[in-house]
Amino acid sequence: MDGGAFKGAEEWMQIRKQMMDLGHELMIVGGSPKFGVYRTDFGWGKLKKTEAVHVDTPGVISLAKSKDEEGGIEVSLALPRVQTNNFNVILKQY
């Protein structure tokens, strides 16, 4: 690989391991609001919902353009059950 978005990709896993060994928490973001997933057409009509199937590791966040609100973003967040429950309690306060 000589450049672009994947420049240095050969070392990403080693860097990640070093960071984890040092006790640093990492956040992984997958997806992008620019993908326009709700514009995807498989010939079955407009999509009603999408799921980020790769969001199964705690700390992973996925972003997608909102299907209902212009300029809005859908956020998927993977947390362990206890943290999810705590997150929901805090979210309901706002």
Image (cartoon, grey):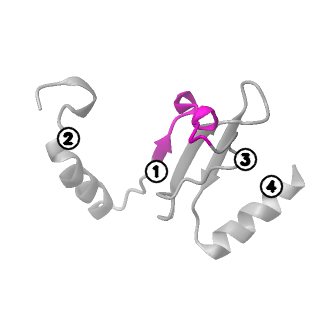
**83 relative to 43, above or below:** below
SS class, disc 1: loop
Q: How far apart are marks 3 and 4 (CA)?
A: 24 Å
Dot label at residue 27: 1
Q: Which residue is drawn at 72% across and 25% down?
A: 71
Q: In this view, does 8 lie to the left or right of 94?
A: left
Dot label at residue 91: 4
User: Looking at the picture, how far across and down is residue 23, in whole percent?
Assistant: 36, 62
Residue at the spot of label 2: 9
Q: Which residue is drawn at 28% across and 53% down?
A: 16
Task: Give the extent of the magenta segment.
Answer: 29-43
User: Looking at the picture, how far across and down is residue 84, in whole percent?
Assistant: 68, 67
Q: Earlier in the sequence, mark 2 or mark 4?
A: 2
Q: Distance between the residues labelled 4 and 1?
A: 20 Å
Q: Distance between the residues labelled 2 and 1?
A: 17 Å
Q: Distance between the residues labelled 3 and 1?
A: 28 Å
Mark 3 burial class by Cα count in 10 Å: few <14, some 14-19, many 20+: few
Please, what is the three-letter code of the amino acid marked with disc 3? Lys
SS class, disc 4: helix
